[in-house]
Structures are given as structure tokens and as C-alpha cells.
Amino acid sequence: MRELGLILLSVLLIFATLEVVASHGDQPLSTIAAQKAIFALHHQAYIKVSPTLLGLKGQNTDWVTVEFSSPNPSVEDWIGVFSPSNFSASSCPAPADNPWVEPPLLCSAPIKYQYANYRTPKYKETGKGSLKLQLINQRSDFSFALFSGGLSNPKVIAASNKVAFSNPKAPVYPRLAQGKVWNEMTVTWTSGYGIGEAVPFVEWGPNGGQPIRSPAGTLTFDRNSMCGEPARTVGWRDPGFIHTSFLKELWPNTLYATFPYSFMYTYKLGHILSNGTYVWSQEYKFRASPYPGQNSLQRVVIFGDMGKAEADGSNEYNDFQHGSLNTTKQLIRDLNNIDVAFLIGDICYANGYLSQWDQFTAQVEPIASTVPFMIASGNHERDWPGSGSFYGNKDSGGECGVLAETMFYVPTENRAKFWYSTDYGMFRFCVADTEHDWREGTEQYQFIEHCLASVDRQKQPWLIFLAHRVLGYSSATFYADTGSFGEPMGRESLQKLWQKYKVDIAIYGHAHHYERTCPIYQNICTNKEKQHYKGAMNGTIHVVAGGGGAGLAEFTTLNTKWSFFKDYDYGFVKLTAFDHSSLLFEYKKSSDGKVYDSFTISRDYRDILACTVDSCPSTTLAS
């Protein structure tokens, strides 16, 4: 206790005025003056945490009870959770002009924090309170501190005992993703074991069959890999080691029933320590992907701008993604009816507070460990001045793409250029990276055209374009204000590709709500039908599915005639391909999982071949 108190003695809290983003709502403590934390341990104050050893049954998430007391209680008292427990605050540079550097700004940012009276309304009168907080395994131990004086004039009046998981280095939070070929699945996970200490691998095989072992590669990065603060300064936390293994030559999912095993593959993460002992994760299951063109029931969920939130109600940095808990809950409930998921940018909004990537991967583990969890790059992953980003903003909080490119696998040729294509049975997905230039003549434009042009529509009739920023059409206020109703320059080059190659649906995030357009080309609806499309649609339907969990964005009051359906709420999109000629589109709310908008497309291959405006080359008749 005394040792931890001496550490806290050196804590310097420097606060900055937070620039509030309108669509994100007001931050709880948005205008705070610069102050120093005062070491003022009081012999009558205490903070106790139990249990002190977590994860005894192998779980990666556990709950603790925090009990505390202050002789001079105030409604401004708060509890901070720190990891590692012996964090250093010997130096604390002043924050730059960055809206994502926000209070409580300790030199080593707390994992999370909560007010002392959150669960104890009479704390101010009694001076005693308690909290139940959830911790996840993050490769280090934890400590807790009771602060008085609020955030503007903090005083450390009590420090806790240390709390740790039974194996802090354990392999955790597997993330599946499709490989570069259809019969390959990748598994990425996080651990505290470097390659000098343990060899990582995945043990996997058909359920009931003979398991095999596939080796894994290992990546990590240091503070100098970050582009700026808070990622390089107050938000830095050791990311541990990120491992990826490639499971190859899988049997396509529906054919697997011909074997004397069940439908699923099983796998578990393993590390062989230098002394020859093994460390294992729990066992997980997944279904292999269908081969391109396979005629089977195929179900895809797509959403953007998800983020994370604390299940125990505590506060965190960039605390405006509470809707993510409902989205996560609904996807888990329907997991038996989901084959692949796409999170199209603005993944977790860590914005430079690296501990929150662990929190996000823990939150989505039930989904990402079971179905391929594919991501796209968004502004809150990539944006940073001078980093090669198409934009020069500070939305990544200094991460400049490093975290997204390392924490998740996607089948790109170069992870710094986060565009890729992936096939799932009757679907072809062309995933753009809106944080890099997409305009005609660029490398990404060439990729997009090749992705759209190379698909065999007789085998894969459902052609879907995905991107984070709205390169098509949006009625969001911030887009309407520009007069472009979409990303400036967004559709200028791309719309002729969507039309030429007959893209069925283009789906975006970035605007935090749901919207669907008519089939459209050159700002004109090419089809007035709203629910049942038959034959050629003559245009592409554009969808904004940015309601994954972050604070909602307003719609313009202007009448956008091409907009068929708008919803100012949280939700996600689901595509169901029944066969080569029948597709169901559904928009579901995260609050209840019910369908609030839908349409169907019914057609055959001849309809795809049919020429529409600018979709076929001109021809001549020669005698």
C-alpha cells in the first residue's frame, strides 16, 4: 500500500479543454482547468478490492467488488482503475491541440473510472461506498485509487491492493477472418508471450476428427510506432503480442456433412513455453466458408462505427458508444443465423488510448471467434497529418492505422493500404479504404475496377461495395452542409464503375444512423420500386449503416428525393442470399433485433447481362 502511494505521489494530472463533437454528445467533463494531483493519503480513508486473483476457471473476464471510504466525502470523488499497477508518472508532457486528448489525463491513463456515488447514493452522507467493476485479461495487474476534489483538483486519498488474473499472459480474444483464398481461415489473437518466450500455434480440425497444428506469426510495436498523442504519450499501453495463424484447405461448409463428423471445425490457441509446457485457450468453433459460387443459404451482417462500452457502467475515454452493447448483444443472439460479419470502419474509437483495443476485442469475442469478422479502415483508425492519409485530421488520436492493421487480419496485399476483395459463396465484396485516395488514376481506383470487373456474375451474382466514408449518397447534416450529400469528390469517379459493373448495393458507415436510397445513377432514381426488385435495377442502391453504436448523427431537413428510408437509431444490415436469383436485405435495430426496413431482389443471369445507361460499351453493326 505504502509503495503504491509513493508511486501515486508523482502523478501529475494535466487537463485540457475538450472540443465536443456535436454528433457524439457532450462529454461528462468537457471543460477542466490544468491542475496537479495532490498526494494526500488519509489514515481514515481506504479502498479495498476483492477478489485479488481472477480467472481461476480460465475465464478472460471477471468481476471485482470495490469498497472504499473517505472521511470527507464529496459527490466529485471518483475511482480510477490503472494497469499496470505500478505505472510510472515521472514525466507528463503538456497535451497538444488534439480534441482526443481528454480528461482524466494522467500521465498513464486509467483503464476506466467511476464516480464514488454511482452505486451508493448516500456516499456523501456516510463516506462509505462500493462498486462492482468488470475487468478483462490485459497482460498485466491492476490497481485502484480513490480521488477526492473531482477531476479539476484531484487528491489521491487512498490506494488499493493489487489485482491480477491467474495467467495475465494467456492467449485471448481470437478474431477469425477470411484468408486470401476461399478455403483459408485466419485466426488472430493477443497474448503476453513474445517469440523468445513461447511458440504460438493453433490446434484445429473437424469436430471429432484428428486435430492438426498450424504455426502462427507474431507482431508487436512500440511507442515510437505511434504518430502522436495521446497514443504516444498518456494513452500508450503495451499492446502485447498479436499472433496470426492460417488454417488452410478447408472443406466448403455444406459439403462437410458428408463426413462422419459434425458440421463445425474446432480450434484452440496454444503456446509452447521454453520449458516445454503448454498454455491453452478455451476451445472455439467455426464453419468453413462456401466456395465461390456455391448455392447455399448465406447470411452476412454489415455495420459501421461500432465502438465499445463498459458493461459495468463505468466511464472511459471517448465515452460515446453505449449503443455498441446492444448491437453486440443482438449479433450474439442471432449468431447461429450469421455466417460472416463486416465492421466497415471506426472500429473501437480508442483514438490513442490503447487499452481500449483490448476492451473491444473482448466485447466482440463471442462473434469474432465464431464467424469471420472482417473490418474496413475508418477515419478513427487512420487519420493523422503527414501519415500518408488522404485526410490530415487527428481522428486516430495518433494511432495512424497501426492498431487496426496489427490487431486484425484482412486479405490485403499491403496492410498499410487497407483495400481488399473477398469472396463468400455467391457474394463478391469489394472493400475500399476511404482514408486513401480512391479517385480515377490512383492505385486504389485500379484495384476497385479490377475487383468489380473480375467477378463471374453467373457464379457470384451478388456484387457488394463496402467503404467507411459515404462515397455515394447521404442525407446526414454534415454532408448536406457541403452540398455534396456524400463525401466531396466521393462518387465523381466511382459511379461510372458501379454502373458499368452493375454493383447491387453499396454500403457505408461514418454517418451514425441508417439510410437507404432508391437504385440511383447520376443523382437520378432509375427505379421507383421500394421493396421488391425484379430484373435489372438499372442503378445501385446506396445504404448508410453507421449505427453500430457511436453517438447518433442528425439528418438534414432538406428533402432528398432519392432517400427511401431513414432511421435515427442504432442498428445493422443483414443480407441473406437464398440462391443465385434471390436476395433479401434487412435493416434491424440494435434495441430489439426486429426488422424495420427490407427489400428483395429477384432476377436471373440474363438480367445482369442486360445493358442500361453507361453499363455496356457502344456497339456497331458491320456488313
Image (spheres, grey):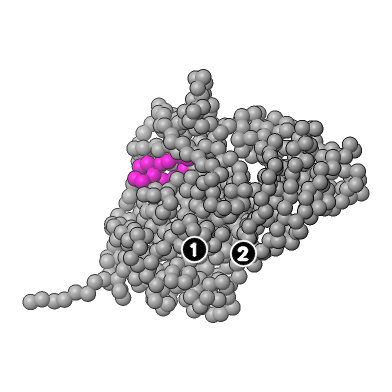
Q: Amino acid at mark 1?
A: Tyr
Would you say the residues marked 2 and 1 are in contact, meaning their CB atoms lie under 8 Å apart?
no
Q: Position of residue 8 (x, y in %)?
A: 76, 40
Where is residue 182 drawn, in percent x and y?
A: 35, 45
Please determine whether, in this image, residue 218 is positioned above or below residue 121.
Answer: above
* Residue 448 in picture, x, y percent from top left: 35, 60
Q: What span is in magenta?
A: 176-189
Crowd tier of the residue under label 2, counting other residues whose Cα lies within 10 Å: few below 14, some 14–19, many 20 or above:
many
> Is 515 left or right of 523, judged from the image as shown?
right
Mark 2 vs 1, N-terminal side: 1
Q: Which residue is mark 1?
A: 391
**Residue 317 part of the magenta-drawn span:** no
Q: Residue furthest left?
A: 623
Please tell me which residue is depicted at 77% across the width and 32% down the height of the picture: 3
Residue at x-position 50% and y-position 49%: 402
Q: Is residue 534 visible?
A: no
Name the mark on residue 76: none
* Front residue of 522 and 35: 35
